[in-house]
Amino acid sequence: MKVPFIDLSLQHKALREQALDALAATYDAIRFCLGKDVTDFERNFSVTLGYPRALGMNSGTSPLHVASLCGGFGPGDEVIVPPFTFISSAWGISYAGATPKFSDIEEGTFNLDPEKLEEAITPKTKGIVVVHLFGQPARMDEIMAIARKHNLFVVEDCAQAAGARYKGTPVGVIGDAGTFSFYPTKNLGGCGEGGAFVSRRADVFEKARLLRVHGSARRYHHDMVGFNFRMDGFQGAMLNVKLPHLASWNARRQAIARRYIAGIKSADVILPQAVDYGASVYHQFTIRHPRRDALREHLAKCEIGTDLIYPVALHQQACYAHLGCKPGSLPVAEKACATCVSLPIFPELTDAQVGHVIESVNAF
Ligand SMILES: *Cc1c(COP(=O)(O)O)cnc(C)c1O
């Protein structure tokens, strides 16, 4: 039985008619840059997930850039970020001219370890980019307590965690700014590039709104150096078609994860740790195994797709070699890179496919 690592065709086949009707309406109305589809999406996204307000943007990286500028990050500043994440989590810091300062993760959740956070703080530290990796909320109470003590601006990278809650609060409005990606493979994936910015703070939100469109509140009047980070009308239309399905898609991801957790029985496999403060929405289901490469080969022979997310930590990327982080300096992240393997977990997987993955892992 074939089990692809991810297959976006089923979701898009199911929504095809509705999606093409929505695109035609946007086309006929010539609503190409922001416009009603995007403002509708911003309202729908806020109401559905529980945000006071949201801004649609052209990717998940752009709101991270904007959030860094809202936090006042700049040359000479250090901003803490986990080393085990997608590279964009650090890009916003670098784009603003500040320096990423990597702080190690915890074993169980792959998220920033609050116990180690204070060691990473120096007089230059200006903020923290928290990542809710693989859909699992990070330990926000502990992180926010440290941030408050040191007066740090907290950005939440929610690219993988749309729909996740921390102790009942949707991720993204616990810190000062929250960012989302609607890249097609994300839990809420668009048909192309897209992202969003949220904040519980009206001042931060207003600055982000100006930065998104040329630093301009009034046409041809520019209060600050801004960007063109507008979301396309077509993308707003696609996201309005998909958003109503996010809750059931996330519930299906969680049901698959529960089956993996109950069914995978191997002394060598370390499963993702379940926590009581906020359920994961399982953007990925990432396990660890001391012979990860051999396990992947075995699963490939069983026609099961897997992926390495992530094989190289941020502090070991060529683009950050100049920061001089030595191998072994962030041991938990480095071990995660060496032992992790992600199993298929998209909502359209059948129970039979999930069963085949469990049996094949157990047979290894
Ligand atoms: C996908 C992702 C991003 C970037 O989003 P793009 O839409 O690809 O720019 C940022 N951070 C994390 C953790 C991601 O997974």
Image: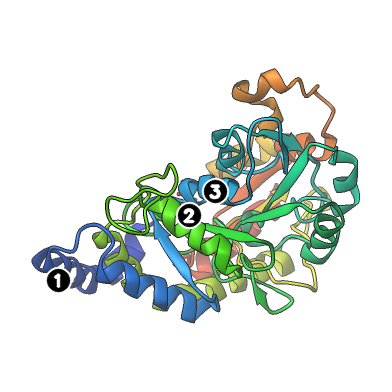
Q: Residue at x 28, y 55 (%)?
A: 219
The residue at which mark 1 appears reads as: 25
Q: Residue at x 67, y 76 (%)?
A: 169
Q: Which label sits in the foreground, 3 or 2? A: 3
Task: Judge from the rendering whether residue 150 lies leftward or rightward of residue 346; answer left or right.
Answer: right
Does the beta carbon of the residue at mark 3 sit less than 8 Å from ligand 1? yes
Task: Judge from the rendering whether residue 143 lies leftward or rightward of residue 296; answer left or right.
Answer: right
Question: Mark 3 to mark 2: distance in Å?
Answer: 34 Å
Query: Residue 132: x percent and y percent?
Result: 66, 57
The residue at which mark 2 appears reads as: 3
| Label located before the other in sequence (3 or 2) | 2
Q: Residue at x 39, y 44 (%)?
A: 227
Label ID, residue 64: 3
Task: Judge from the rendering whether residue 32 lies leftward or rightward of residue 111; answer left or right.
Answer: left
**Three-letter residue code for mark 1:** Ala
* Label 3 environment density (alpha carbons within 10 Å; few <14, some 14–19, many ≥20): many
Q: How many marks?
A: 3
Please tell me whether mark 1 sits on a helix, a strand or a loop: helix
- As rendered, which of 121 and 182 lies closer to the eye? 121
Query: Residue 77: x percent and y percent?
Result: 71, 35
**Three-letter residue code for mark 3:** Leu
Question: Mark 1 to mark 3: distance in Å?
Answer: 31 Å
Q: Which label sits in the foreground, 1 or 3? A: 3
* Label 1 environment density (alpha carbons within 10 Å; few <14, some 14–19, many ≥20): some
Please tell me whether mark 3 sits on a helix, a strand or a loop: helix
178 lies above or below 95: below
| Label located before the other in sequence (2 or 1) | 2
* Label 2 environment density (alpha carbons within 10 Å; few <14, some 14–19, many ≥20): many
Label ID, residue 54: none
**Three-letter residue code for mark 2:** Val
32 lies above or below 243: above
Q: Which label sits in the foreground, 2 or 1? A: 1
